């Protein structure tokens, strides 16, 4: 959103450092955002809306102009569809040989893909909010999709909930770089058991710093060493 975020910031009397702190990332990241050199995620858009007490629709309308209004309902559907297909991708490439994966391990793979994408490209794949829940860093929407979508098959195995594919993911929703990253992460963790990936994600800075049920800022992953991102 070139220039518009800067206009909002200046009208509120905030410095770049102050706004960056409120948004939870560095000043250089905000500078890139204000110059239009970096896309804004859904999570960041919500925060900007809260900070300046403006509906998201108003922010988008101001940026795009009346003739290019975004259908917010369709916008949300597109975002949810990509997140849905990210889950499908993680099952396709991260499941065991029988095509099944534990629900918990699946949630971890999705989290690692989104946060690793932010680390590498300053842009997550889905942009959904992850909270520090007992099950790990996970968006609320993850549970809704798994429990209600016909794209997945669910069965219980001992104490674990196993998830498998009913339909294949739509690869066209992802860039080549995103697909490459998803496959690399799934390949690395494919043979690991659920507890191993739990221990890994709980050992990361985003999990350690945040409080229970708190939204985990994507920017925290930038504090990790490269070999500890995924």
Image: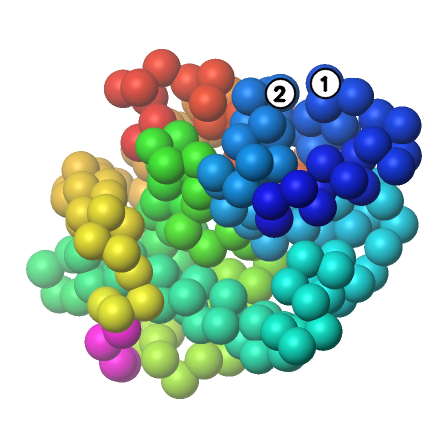
Specify the farthest residue to the bottom.
Answer: 150
Please identify the dominant SS of the magenta region: loop
Q: Which residue is at 42% across, 18% downward?
A: 224
Residue under circle 2? 27
Residue 57 drawn at (x, y percent):
75, 66
Q: Which residues are magenta?
A: 165-170
Residue 64 placement, left or right of 189? right
Return the residue nearer the eye: 73 or 156. Answer: 73
Mark yes or no: residue 130 visible: no
Figure check: 114 above or below 102: above
Figure check: 160 above or below 147: above
Q: Are the residues at dot 2 and dot 1 in contact (C-beta closer than 8 Å)?
A: yes
Query: Disc 1 on helix, strand or loop?
Result: helix
Could you classify mark 1 by the number of other residues whose Cα lies within 10 Å: few (under 14), some (14-19), or many (20 or more)? some
Q: Is residue 6 magenta?
A: no
Q: Which residue is at 54% across, 76% downward?
A: 77
Return the residue nearer the eye: 227 or 126. Answer: 126
Figure check: 151 above or below 161: below
Query: Disc 2 on helix, strand or loop?
Result: helix
Counting residues from the start of the chain, the first of labels 2 and 1 encountered is 1
Task: Write down the quadrant of residue 51 in the picture.
Answer: top right
Could you classify mark 2 by the number of other residues whose Cα lies within 10 Å: few (under 14), some (14-19), or many (20 or more)? some
Residue under circle 1? 17
Q: Which residue is at 18% across, 42% downward?
A: 184
């Amino acid at each position: 959103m070139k220039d518009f975020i800067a206009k909002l910031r200046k009208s509120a009397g905030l410095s770049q450092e102050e706004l960056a702190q409120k948004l939870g990332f560095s000043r250089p990241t905000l500078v890139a955002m204000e110059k239009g050199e970096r896309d804004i995620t859904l999570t960041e858009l919500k925060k900007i809306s809260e900070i300046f007490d403006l509906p998201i629709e108003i922010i988008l309308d101001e940026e795009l102009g009346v003739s290019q209004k975004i259908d917010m309902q369709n916008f949300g559907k597109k975002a949810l569809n990509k997140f849905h297909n990210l889950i499908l991708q993680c099952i396709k490439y991260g499941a065991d040989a029988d095509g099944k994966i534990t629900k918990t391990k699946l949630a971890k793979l999705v989290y690692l893909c989104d946060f690793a994408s932010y680390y590498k490209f300053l842009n997550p794949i889905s942009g959904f909010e992850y909270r520090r829940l007992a099950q790990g860093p996970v968006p609320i929407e993850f549970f809704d999709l798994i429990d209600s979508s016909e794209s997945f098959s669910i069965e219980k195995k001992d104490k674990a909930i196993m998830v498998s594919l009913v339909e294949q993911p739509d690869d066209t929703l992802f860039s080549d770089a995103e697909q490459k990253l998803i496959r690399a992460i799934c390949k690395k963790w494919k043979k690991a058991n659920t507890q191993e990936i739990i221990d890994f994600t709980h050992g990361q800075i985003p999990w350690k710093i945040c409080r229970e049920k708190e939204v985990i800022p994507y920017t925290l992953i930038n504090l990790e060493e490269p070999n500890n991102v995924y």
